[in-house]
Amino acid sequence: MAKRVGFATRLGAIAAAVGSAVGLGNIWRFPFEAGQNGGGAFIIVYIFCIIVMGIPVILSEFIIGRSTHSNMKAALKRLSPGKKYYLFTYICILGSFVVIGFYSVVCGWIIEYLYQAAIGGLNGHTPQEYNDMFSSLVADPWRCVGWTILFLLLNFLVMSRGIEKGIERVASTMMPMLFVILVIFCINSLLLPGASKGLEFLFYPDFSELTMRGVLDAFGQAFLSLSIGISCLVTYSSYFKDDACLSKDATIVAVLDTLVAILSGVMIFPAVFSFGVEPTAGPRLIFEVLPGIFQQMTGGYFWALLFFLLVFFASLTSTISLSEIPITFMIEEHKLSRPRAILWTSLLTLVLAVLAALSFNVLDDVKVFGKSIFDAMDYAASNVFMLLGGLFTAVYVGWILDRKVVHEQLTNGGRLKGRMEPFLIFCLRYVAPVSIFFIFLYLTGLI
Ligand code: PFF
């Protein structure tokens, strides 16, 4: 069993969980999902989901992790001896590979834009040219795969040199910087001509624009963004100290993560409307819009560089935490050495990532359930793995796990009041399962 040490400080533990949560999900995916699903109404469903499912499932993962101080499989075996619930861990492992697979491609795009920003290539173009710039990147298999491999190599080096804690420390100072920069970009975006249309799109709820598929997307987005449903936070919280207040920490993670997502929306949508970009542009949305925002700013060259650098670090902390799911599992359950576990994880990810990168060019006619490989992985990650994983976690803690464990963890053995317990149990038992069940019935055409 690997030696387990607690986080040095309470802030360190929260910063690591926030580092995992804040990433491409907030900055790249949230704006385009909101754009494709009508804006305001999507955001209301998203926030509803964060409150009644997101926070309860974060807390559930914290309870499982801290009460056992072990990875998901060992935790489920310990909490439910003789039962087969631990098999769920394999779904988590599979889900984490799917997420890192398509994330690495987007991280590759971020490196390309960082490079373009450095050589001044993002300056002085029209919105159409920014559109073409992105199209030519994804159409070129060499560049697309090359950047993806470079990203995976960096991810591999960080983990195999054992400097992930260092990166997390760097990231926890960069995270506040990212926050400040987002605010600065939001202000710039809001000063663009026609910005108010973007705000209206983002905050005025037009429910006629929201489909049931949009509701599913909002739920999936919330789970992906909070890093829940595939046991990532179980691993993190297994290192938490016994005096951490779990409900407070879960709320802090959820609030900060949501704030970053909303700020990203406020940064992107006024510019979307001002530049005449389609809000439904999908995964290419931020890459078409951001260079235009930098261009309007004094010192745009440096802002662009700084922004992509910070997003790169935010992505790296997310992929490190994702990789840690299979790595910890291989080490603790299959007795692999850490270097071997890292190597296997990196190789498996590489295969998936290259397939996803090629699905924009060489493999663009290969369809999985009618979607490109990249889109299928993106969809499966959030709307299937994380959502169903979240459902399992909710049902497990709400219905199956001994209530004494829940009470112990929420009150730290009676030292805290644990006021959140009734809300938590109600959401886990009824709200989460019923909502997710109805969406699936609807999507499968049964209602
Ligand atoms: N929450 C991360 C993001 O928003 O980019 C993605 C993520 C990280 C998902 C870790 C799942 C996970 F286990």
Image (cartoon, helix red, strand yellow):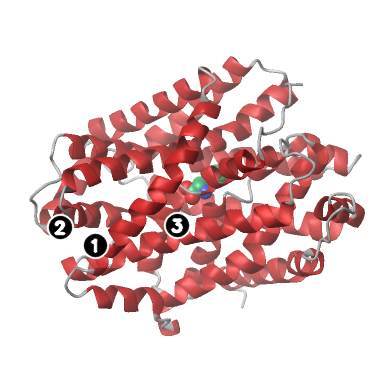
Graded by Cα atoms within 10 Å as few (under 14), some (14 to 19) or many (20 or more), the crowding at tag 2 reads some
- Looking at the image, residue 37 lies above or below residue 5: below
- Looking at the image, residue 177 lies above or below residue 338: below
Locate residue 229, reporting x and y percent.
64, 51
Q: Are marks 2 and 1 in contact (CB under 8 Å)?
A: yes
**Label at residue 296:** 2
What is the C-alpha distance between the residues marked 2 and 1? 8 Å
Tag 3: residue type? Val
Q: Earlier in the sequence, mark 2 or mark 3?
A: 3
Image quadrant where one finds the N terminus:
top right
Locate residue 346, reporting x and y percent.
49, 25
Tag 2: residue type? Gln
Instruction: Using residue 327 as the reference point, say whether residue 120 is left or right of it.
Output: left
**Label at residue 188:** 1
Tag 1: residue type? Asn
Q: Are marks 2 and 3 in contact (CB under 8 Å)?
A: no
Graded by Cα atoms within 10 Å as few (under 14), some (14 to 19) or many (20 or more), the crowding at tag 1 reads some
What is the C-alpha distance between the residues marked 1 and 3? 16 Å
Which is nearer the eye, 279 or 171?
A: 171
Residue indicated by mark 3: 260
Residue 9, visible in the rendered structure: yes
Q: In which quarter of the image is residue 420?
A: bottom right
Q: Which of marks 1 and 3 is nearer the N terminus?
A: 1
Which is nearer the eye, 29 or 101?
A: 29
Total numbered labels:
3
Graded by Cα atoms within 10 Å as few (under 14), some (14 to 19) or many (20 or more), the crowding at tag 3 reads many
Which is more foreground, mark 1 or mark 3? 1
Which is nearer the eye, 377 or 5?
A: 5
